[in-house]
Image (cartoon, helix red, strand yellow):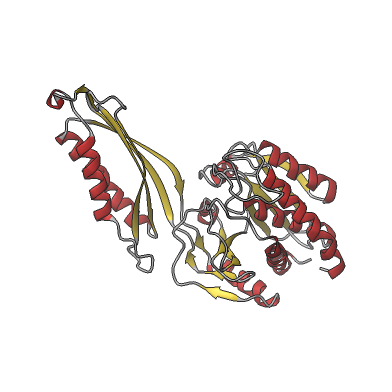
Amino acid sequence: MTTSFIDQLIPRLHAIRKELHAYPEVAEQEFATAKRIENHLRENTSATVTRVAKTGVLAIFDSKVEGKTILLRADTDALPIQEVNDFTHKSTFPAISHKCGHDGHTSIMVGVAEIATKFPIKTGKLLLLFQPAEENGMGAQGVLNDSGFQQFEPDFVFALHNLPGFEKHQIVIKEKAFTANVKSIIIKLNGKTAHAAEPEKGFNPALAIAKILTYSEEQTNNFPEREDFFLVTPIYLNMGELAYGISAGYGEVHLTIRSWSNELMEENITRLLSFIDKVSEKYHLKAGIEWLQVFHANQNNAEAIAEIKKAALENQFSLNQIKHPFKWGEDFGLFTQKCKGAMFGLGAGKNMPALHNPDYDYPDEITITGIKMFHQIVSQTLGC
């Protein structure tokens, strides 16, 4: 990459990022976002551009020479969070904003597409995936289910995530699990309403909810440095009505569950479901269970990590090999389950607001770092 080309590219990418930030769209609603990405790619790159999973975009670079297929992924969706920042590119939509930096991840991948046009790959295929619906865990599965995507069989898959709390431009790596297994559960408890003066004539879910919450706390082992890390977090409760003469007859408990180990996750979930059955029977309730937002752990492949390390060293970026995974979920784990690959972190600044905070904003100065990392990985695997 020449300095003059980068000098021309970066201001355009910053403008794209800020436009995406100003017009955010939540998971599975990224129609205008996808259109913006498509238009830019078609006008400024040599990629073959196609839609996947309705609101996803796939940019394909084919060298027409036999070789590996490499997939690089960026996520595009925003969050249902009200922004409190007051800069000129603030969100124009109430209660929707880019508070995880997916606008930045997208601008990085647009930059990779422009560089792949300027410096074409010599062998194989390069797939740049602008993936929707990461935040609700539906996007990766949607792409993998798409018949247009299924024609490709990537040899390696790579992704990054910006990380507040780490030095800017630092590359954060870890072999094996990089992010947690995460599942969300809705527990619906159906009883029977009664007069509040005669609760014994109905079946109130209150004590069952209390016992489920207590049991969840007892099951929790919130020590991420340990292999048996297991975290149950209460998310939402709903019971009864604001009618003080009625003993409640229905309640809901929403929980998220996290662990490093698939086996431990399944064992503890089996115990939780058994406990729910017992407590429901005790209080004469009918329990309904709904699972949603399932994220599989990103299992980083050793060969893929070696490519990331090499790319960081070639760029003379600081490397930070962390000891235990991040507790949040990331649906890129579905890709690393099916293909060799890895996710790495990109430091966003030690004093940055945390991800999903209402005052967070992706720092544009790390965009060039992400581009250089991806470009070097492509150069190492496909040649440029």
In the displayed structure image, the side of residue 129 where residue 40 appears, left or right: right
Q: Which quadrant would the N terminus be assigned to in this image? A: bottom right
Q: Residue 325, image x and y in percent?
A: 45, 64
User: Which image quadrant is residue 150 in?
Assistant: top right
Tell me which residue sits at (64%, 54%) in the image. 73
Name the one closer to the observer, 128 or 213: 213
User: Which image quadrant is residue 345 in?
Assistant: bottom right
Q: Quick check: 266 above or below 340?
A: above
* Residue 64 appears in the picture as rendered: no
Q: Residue 96, image x and y in percent?
A: 59, 41
Name the one closer to the observer, 293 or 167: 167
Q: Residue 155, image x and y in percent?
A: 62, 59
Q: Residue 321, image x and y in percent?
A: 52, 74
Q: Which quadrant would the C terminus be assigned to in this image? A: bottom right
Number of marks: 0
In the displayed structure image, the side of residue 160 where residue 374 appears, left or right: right
* Residue 76 appears in the picture as rendered: yes
